[in-house]
Amino acid sequence: MKAVCWMGKEDMQVHEVPEPKILNPRDAIVRVTTTCICGSDLHLYDGLVPTLAQGDILGHEFMGEVVETGPGVDSAKLKTGDRVVVPFTIACGGCGPCHEELWSLCDNSNPNAWFVEKLMGHSPSGLFGYTHMMGGYAGGQAQYVRVPFADVGPIKVPESLRDDQVVFLSDIFPTGYMAAENCNIKPGDTVAIWGCGPIGQFAIRSAFMMGAGRVIAIDHVPERLQMAREGGAETLNFDDVDVLEALREITGSKGPDACMDAVGMEASGHGMQYFYDSAKQKLRLVQDRIGVLRQCIQACRKGGTVSVPGVYAGFDDKVPLGAFMNKSLTLKTGQTHMMRYMKPLLERIEKGEIDPSFVISHRLPLTQAPEGYRIFREKEDHCTKVVLDPWAEAAAA
């Protein structure tokens, strides 16, 4: 089968690799019909997250058809022929965190938990296509994928909905929704969101679903800012304004009720702190550029909430903990607890409340994934989201 393999920093290649097999009784094999390149994949592309190995298959946003199930999979829950969306987090369904619906903190799905425990104290769940410290699972940028604990994560989707309407239930729609939920939004609140990539776009729309009065979106890519305005947000271009000063003016010096970092470890910016972060990251002294997180903490009103869906990977300095503590801020973050949100958001799609396909700019065959990674990272050709068809060229042949 064809699969997108990481061969080194900024080096993605499509290779013929062996098809996956059932390894455990609760496994399923899914024939992938649609898969995507996520902003989080770009951190891997840029070589910023450790424990990738040459030849690893990437991708954690995918859906398809079940073609085989293990003997431990209850056919009432999942069977051959089912059309499913697969969440990017892997959860067993039986441990303490899973029973508390903290699905991304599953105790049993990361076989390499010992490694993460040395860095973080405890391990989160395994993830598809996202390094060996997160389980070493092959990802979904491929024609087939093995899905562990298949009776827990995948959800069936109706034939009446297109792939591009439901595939983002695998990550970015629930992630944007949980990020907005973590803002503790009350009716009429002002929410500032740094980053107008796909997760930021879903966070904007989710914040309005939850009753936000104003959403202020911050970025510098014109097409992303335009898409944010189409979603109802006011926008700030950080190349043109001092963001902290602008937010003070917009909010009458109070500050936003909630601030969201939908950027993460590769934040862009200006000034000495940005150059300091960039230099330390290039020298591998830190893994993350945290300029956006700093601004969120500084901008947020007293007693407000900072929500962080953006991915961070390491130990970082120059965090304004003094401001965080003295303003009595609340910080809420985490990988998305996918199974809380997938079915309720599917219902919103079915009712016509939102069509998630709005975010797509590029549709490519899987064989063009390396070019898709490049233009997405470089933000060329007005690229906002790349969707890949694993079978396009095979069908043409």
Image (cartoon, helix red, strand yellow):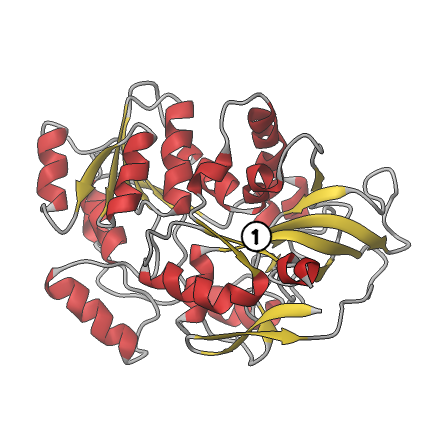
Mark 1 neighbour density, 10 Å: few (under 14) some (14–19) many (20 or more):
many
2 and 250: which is toward the camera:
2
Which quarter of the image is occupied by the C terminus? Answer: bottom right
Element type where label 1 sits in the image: loop
- Is residue 244 shown to the viewer in this render? yes
Give percent across and percent down for residue 96: 67, 47
Give percent across and percent down for residue 278: 23, 70
Could you tell whether 74 is left or right of 230 in the image?
right
Could you tell whether 119 is left or right of 382 in the image?
right
**Mark 1 highlights which residue?**
61
Residue located 63% across and 46% down the image: 97
255 and 43: which is toward the camera:
43
Could you tell whether 217 is left or right of 82 in the image?
left
- What's the amino acid at mark 1? Glu
346 and 312: which is toward the camera:
346
Q: Going by the picture, which residue comes out furthest to the right?
A: 71
User: On screen, 165 above or below 27?
Assistant: above
Q: Quadrant of residue 201?
A: top left
Which quarter of the image is occupied by the N terminus? Answer: bottom right
- Is residue 184 shown to the viewer in this render? no
Q: Quadrant of residue 158?
A: top right
296 and 145: which is toward the camera:
145
